[in-house]
Image: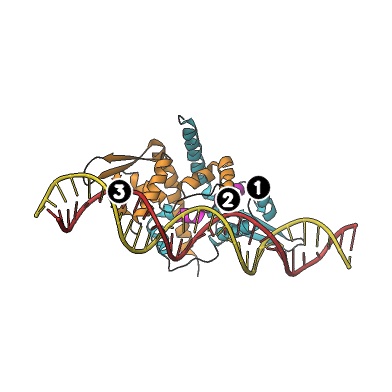
Chain colours: A cyan, B orange, C red, D yellow
Amino acid sequence: MTEIKQSSTNFSNKLALSDECSEAYASNIIGGQWTLVICSWLLSGKLRFGELKKKLPGITERMLTLQLRKLEEHKIISRTVYAEVPPRVEYELTEIGYGLKSVIMELEAWGTSHKKLIGEQPV
Amino acid sequence: MTEIKQSSTNFSNKLALSDECSEAYASNIIGGQWTLVICSWLLSGKLRFGELKKKLPGITERMLTLQLRKLEEHKIISRTVYAEVPPRVEYELTEIGYGLKSVIMELEAWGTSHKKLIGEQPV
DNA sequence: GTCATTACTTACATTATTTATAGTACCTAA
DNA sequence: TTAGGTACTATAAATAATGTAAGTAATGAC
């Protein structure tokens, strides 16, 4: 967020990886702290800024804004502003955004079984 | 890596999210810069430290070590040391680690189509 | 004795991401 | 006139992740 330093090694590493590995590319896009959770909420329908905020306990408005902007920039969500007062802004998954559904489901399934495995660990 | 500050807001946010969202949990585990790429290389068989290093242009030994340690800690890979000189260490996916295959494939598919979509964007 | 090889470790520096806190514009309703 | 709701923005600070550079142990080849 804020500003990325395009001369950093980190930047060029990410670029190179993204270039040759689609999974690294995808991970860079959706890897943010709240990104996937936002998407998974949006999977069940459009939501307003304030509604998302309520669903994500602990997120700051700044973080939510940043993540939404990033998602919008990557065409994963669309943003609709209604010229009302007080303002109303709705966020909705785009088609490619909705395509994340299977990714999210796989991740969720894996996460669940991993949690279970670790939980079973003999102490 | 290094040390996580367990009193930070970030830490408790991650904990809370991981707790209620398996996809956020999974993302925390495999979200590292090189994690998925390492796993995807290991999907096709065990590899030595030096072999991995060659396959990941740009990674430093420190980073590779850190990521491997983290993966090992999460039981995603196993580490076998052969008492030889010079030393030989092999890394291999565990069963749960191998379970990441479908996650990786979904991510890769999504990444590919996203790349294509963005590439088509009218300038 | 010296060098090469391998898989690391250590100390430190830099960059990136996340959090904290306060403030803004707009109109409405009291 | 004042307060209130909504969706933000600005700035600074804290935390986390990554990178740089150098060094280590063991042993066999020379």
Work out whether disc 1 and disc 3 sit on a shared chain. no
In the picture, measured across the screen, residue A99 lies left or right of residue B86, that is: right
Magenta span: A25-42
In the picture, measured across the screen, residue A60 lies left or right of residue B46, that is: right
Percent coordinates x, y for residue A55 in the rendering: 65, 47
Answer whether residue A58 is visible to the viewer in this image. Answer: yes
Mark 3 lies on a secondary structure that is helix
- Kindly report the distance in space between the C-alpha atoms of the residues bearing marks 2 and 1: 21 Å
Quadrant in which residue A62 is drawn: bottom right
- Closer to the chain start, of discs 3 and 2, is 2
The overriding secondary structure of the stretch rendered in magenta is: helix
Q: Amino acid at mark 2?
A: Ser
Q: Which residue is mark 2?
A: B8
Q: Amino acid at mark 1?
A: Lys
Query: Badge 3: how crowded within 10 Å, few (<14), some, or many (20+)?
Result: some
Mark 1 lies on a secondary structure that is helix
Q: Which residue is mark 3?
A: B49
